[in-house]
Amino acid sequence: MVNLDLPLSSALFPSDPQGIDAEILARGSLPRDALVDRFISHCSPYHVILRNDEDVSAVKPRAGAAPKVEIILETRGGNKTATRVHGLEDYFIRAQPLADELRKTCAGSTSVEPWTAGGKGKMEVMVQGPQKDAVVKALEKRGVDKKWIEVLDKTKGGKKK
């Protein structure tokens, strides 16, 4: 248990006298785990993306949550499915080598074009067919965790997975 003093309680609990906060303040103490959870919820999120064996102290953290690599499955030309991938530059992944690997892995054609919605220097890889699993596997091999990959399936009414 942690005893709450005035600076700690005013920093972590709003001046709202209603609800559970009022009970905690009236008791004057709180379990340590609950206090840590409360403290972390008041912190701003940030992220750092490292290259290979780069040291964390050498890179400046960026504000906000980590960016996501988007994989979009869409129907083109009637019933043909294409898989588009963008957001690779944030993870230091070059588009052309990824496209070359996916061309061999998926046994289909690939193309690399500028991503118009992404800004200057951002590229998009397009793979023939529904190749979500192959793209995810190639990204994981390059160090991108599944939680940083967002899959949008526009072939079946725009369901998000």
Image: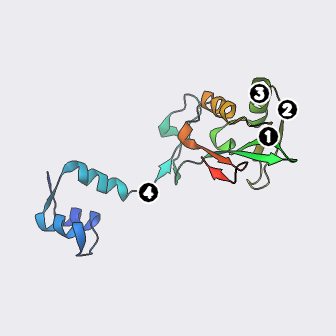
Q: Position of residue 126 (x, y in %)?
A: 79, 40
Q: Earlier in the sequence, mark 2 or mark 4?
A: 4
Q: Position of residue 51 (x, y in %)?
A: 59, 33
Viewer-nearest residue: 122 or 23: 23
> Could you tell me how far apart the alpha carbons at marks 2 and 4 are, in whole angstroms?
42 Å
Callout 1 secondary element: strand
Q: Which mark is residue 44?
A: 4
Q: Position of residue 33 (x, y in %)?
A: 24, 48
Residue for badge 1: 126
**Height in image: 60 above or below 23?**
above
> Could you tell me how far apart the alpha carbons at marks 3 and 4 are, in whole angstroms?
41 Å
Q: Which mark is residue 106?
A: 3
> Could you tell me how far apart the alpha carbons at marks 2 and 1 are, in whole angstroms?
8 Å
Residue 7 quadrant: bottom left
Circles 1 and 3, Cβ within 8 Å, touching? The answer is no
Toward the right, the furthest residue is 77
Callout 2 secondary element: loop
